[in-house]
Image: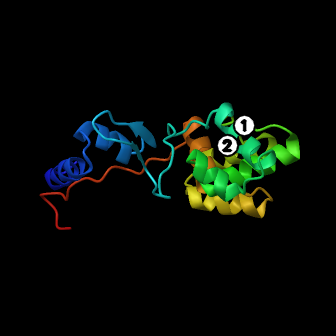
Amino acid sequence: FSSSGRTRRRRLAAESGLETDIYDRVHLGYTDTIIVPAAPSIFTITSSAYRRPSPEGYPYSVDLRERVVRSVEREGLSRRQAAKRFGVGIKTAIIWVQRFRATGSVAASRMGGHRPRKIIDSHREWLLKCCRGGDFTLRGLVAELARRGLQVGYRPVWAFVRAEKLSYKKRRWSPASATART
């Protein structure tokens, strides 16, 4: 945090009767309700911008998903109300309810995994022959593969050429000769 942000947080914490670290935990999204012994009541965030923190790259827990879906299906809350109650995004709640209605499960879909290579068999053989035959450009290879019926991008062709150790290196630049005019 910047020093001006720290000063502002200290001032707001003092005005609300909270210690700075408790104020930070609340306002940075680590909790939505805390009990403050010095304060007469419970301090609650009422901002609709509050979102439950989730580790980046990981799905929300199945327990949270089930609670959101249960509140929509059994309690009759709207998806927006359920999203606000549990601190998740509206679109997230909508997707979870749709998945539950379609499959009967709220479990997260499989993440990541291996994508098989597109350049295989006859295309692979043609590329090897073409690359070993002389000069080539990756963009030219992408265009030629498209003419042959295989739609691939620049990245898969680059990965193929690199994996096969086919990169073409131009002759190194050398300085002008000191004895002859250039």
Q: Is residue 108 left or right of residue 24?
A: right
Observer-nearest of 61 and 177: 61
Residue to which mark 1 is pinned: 66
Q: Which of 147 and 50 lies nearest the eye of the viewer?
A: 50
Where 36 sits versus 181, above or below?
Answer: above
Residue 169 location in percent, x, y?
44, 47
The residue located at (72%, 37%) in the rendering is 66
Q: What is the crowding at mark 2: few (fewer than 14 residues within 10 Å), some, or many (at least 20)? A: some
The residue shown at (70%, 55%) is: 79
In the rendered structure, find residue 123 and report the number of the disc placed on it: none
- In the picture, residue 64 is in which quadrant? top right
Q: Residues within 10 Å of mark 1 (few under 14, many from 20)?
A: some
Q: CA distance from mark 1 to mark 2?
A: 52 Å
Residue 148: x, y in percent? Answer: 79, 59
In this rendering, would 33 be left or right of 138?
A: left
Q: Which quadrant of the rendered structure holds the C terminus? A: bottom left
Q: Is residue 80 left or right of residue 8?
A: right
Q: Is residue 52 visible?
A: yes
SS at badge 2: helix
Count of numbered tags: 2
Name the residue carrying label 2.
128
Q: Is residue 31 visible?
A: no
Q: Secondary structure at mark 1?
A: helix
- Kind of residue at disc 2: Leu
Give amino acid for label 1. Glu
Foreground: 121 or 80?
Answer: 80
Residue depicted at 49% across the width and 47% down the height: 168
Indicate the position of residue 78 as horizontal and vertical percent values: 72, 57
> Disc 1 or 2, which lies upstream in sequence?
1
- Residue 67 percent location from the top left of the image: 69, 38
| Residue furthest to the bottom | 182
